[in-house]
Image: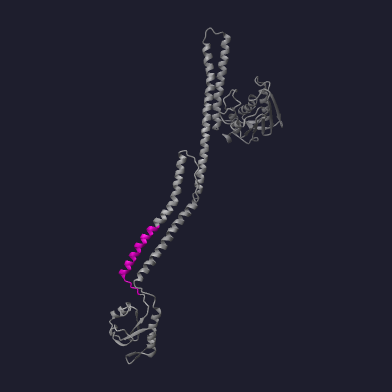
Amino acid sequence: MKWKLTARFLLSVLSIVIIVIFVNTAIFVGLLTYRLSNDYDGPSATKEEDFVRDFQQYIEIKNGSATINKEGLEQLHQRNAWIQLLDVNGQVIDAHFTPEKAPSHYAPIDLIQVYKYKEFEADTTVFIGVKDEVSYLIGIRSDVSRLVMNVSGTSFLQFIGKFGLFIVIADLLVATLVGWLFGRTLTKPLYAMIERIRHLKNHEHQTATTPGGVYKPVFENLNEVSRELAAHEQERKRLEIMREEWISNVSHDMKTPLASIRGYAELLNDDQLAYSEQTEYAKIIEKQSLHMQDLLDDLNLTMRLRHQQLPLSLRKVNMVPFIREIVIDTLNTTQFELANIEFNAASENSYHQIDEHFMRRAIMNFLHNALLHNTPDVAVQVLVDGNSITISDNGKGIPAEDLEHIFERYYRGTNTEKTTGTGLGTAIARDIIEAHGGTVTITSEEGKGTSVNIYLQSENRISQNEKF
C-alpha cells in the first residue's frame, strides 16, 4: 500500500514534468516559427542562390571592364532572369534584360533594400554575387522567395519576454489541470474513507461498495472492521440482555432467602414461641443464609475466573482415585444415595498437576448436573482414560438451542426451571478446567443423553505462573 501510493505520487509528478516540458517546447517552436514567418515569403531559394554564386564563371573581366559571355546570357534567358554588373562605387557598368525600373547606380543601402525586398516586380527576387572587384545583381522572375531573419537585442528581449509569459501561463494551466485531476483521484477516496469512519463512529455498520485501485485494501479492511463491530455490537446487546436477566434472577434468588430470614426472625421474637419451633426457625434461617453465601461466593469466583485472577495451589495428583472419591462422596449424600453411577478407568495411574479444591468443584458440577437435570433412573458413566475424563448419561439430553449457550454465564436452559443454584455453575466449571490448561466439550442429543469430555494436559505441562 505504501509503495503504491508513493509510486502513484511520483508518477503524477513525472507526468506534470513531462507535460510541462512538452508544452514549453511546443510554445518555443511555435513562437520561433511565428517570428520567422514575418520574414518568410515562400519556398527556399537554395537552387537559385547556387546559380547566382556559380554565375561568376560566365563573367569575363579584361582591362578593368566586365562582360558576360554568350553562355551566361543563355543561362539568364533560360531562367527568365536579368543581370546588372556594378563597379566598386556601385555604378552599373553592364546590364542585360533589366527592367525599366532598375537604377543605374546603387548605394549600399540600396543593395540591402533590393536584396531584402522585391523592389522591382512582385515576382522577381534579386540575388547578389561578387567576382573580384565586380558585384552583380541577378533578378529571377519566378515563385522563388527568400527566408530573411533579423536579430537584434531589442527584438530578442521581446521574444524572450513573450516566450516567458506564454511559458508561465501554460505551466500554470498545466499544473492546475493535472493538480485538479490528481487531487480528485486522491481526495475522493479519502473523503469516502472519512465518511466510512464517521459511520463507524456513529455505530452505522452497513457495508459500503469497495472501489478498485490503490485504496481497495483500505476499504476492504474498513468493511471487515464494520462487520466485526456489528457482530460485537450484537453480541454486546445479547450479553446485556442476558446480564439483565441474570441480575433479575439473582435479585429474585436473594430476595427469597432474605424474605424467609426476615419472616422467621420476626417469629423468633414471639415470647410465646415453643423451643422446638425456635430451633426449627433457626435452622431455616441458617439454611437460607448459607444459600445466600453460596450465591455471593459464586459471583466472586466467576469474576475472578473471568479476569484470570484465581490463585491455584497445584500439586501432583493421581486422577483415578481422585475422581473415584468424588463419585463415592456423591453416592454417600442423601440426595443421590440411590443414583446409578458407574465408574471406570483405563489404568490406575493418571497424574496431573491440579488444584484439588477447584478441580473437585468442576467435576462435581458436571456430575451433579447429569443427576439433577434428568429423571431419578438415569444411568451415569464416569470414565478416566489417560488425559481424558468423560461423564456421560442416557438422560433426556439438551436442546440444540440451549447447548450452544451451555457455557455462558447467567444462562439457564429450558430443563432447569425447577433446580436451585446461581446459573454460574457450568461457566465456573469450564473456567476452572481452562485455568488448569484443559478443555471441555459437551455433546448431547435430545432423548439419548449428554456427554461431557474433559481433556487435561499431561503432567507438568502447566504451572501456576504460566496461567496467572
Residue 421, image x and y in percent? 58, 24
Q: In which quarter of the image is residue 174?
A: bottom left
Q: Residue furthest bottom?
A: 63
Determine if residue 406 is in view.
Answer: no
Q: Is residue 214 magenta?
A: no
- Queried whether the magenta region covers residue 172, the answer comes back as yes
- Whole-percent x and y of residue 227? 52, 40
**Which residue does the image show at 51% across and 36% down from the upper left?**
233
From this view, report whether residue 176 is shown above or below residue 352. below
The colour scheme is one colour
Disc count in the image? 0
Q: Can residue 258 be seen in this view?
A: yes
Please say if 34 is above or below 364: below
Which span of residues is magenta-colored?
148-174
Camera-side residue of 437 and 410 = 410
Report x, y in % for residue 397. 65, 29
Give the residue at x 55% y 16%. 285
Quadrant where the C terminus is found in the figure: top right
Picture quadrant where residue 340 is located: top right
Q: Main secondary structure of the magenta part?
A: helix
Asked which quadrant contains residue 103, the reply is bottom left
Residue 87 image position (x, y, % from top left): 30, 86
Comparing 50 with 338, the one in front is 50
Q: Residue furthest top?
A: 272
- Residue 75 position (above or below residue 286): below
Q: Is residue 437 left or right of residue 123?
A: right
Q: Is residue 39 left or right of residue 319?
A: left
The one nearer the camera, 104 or 161, is 104
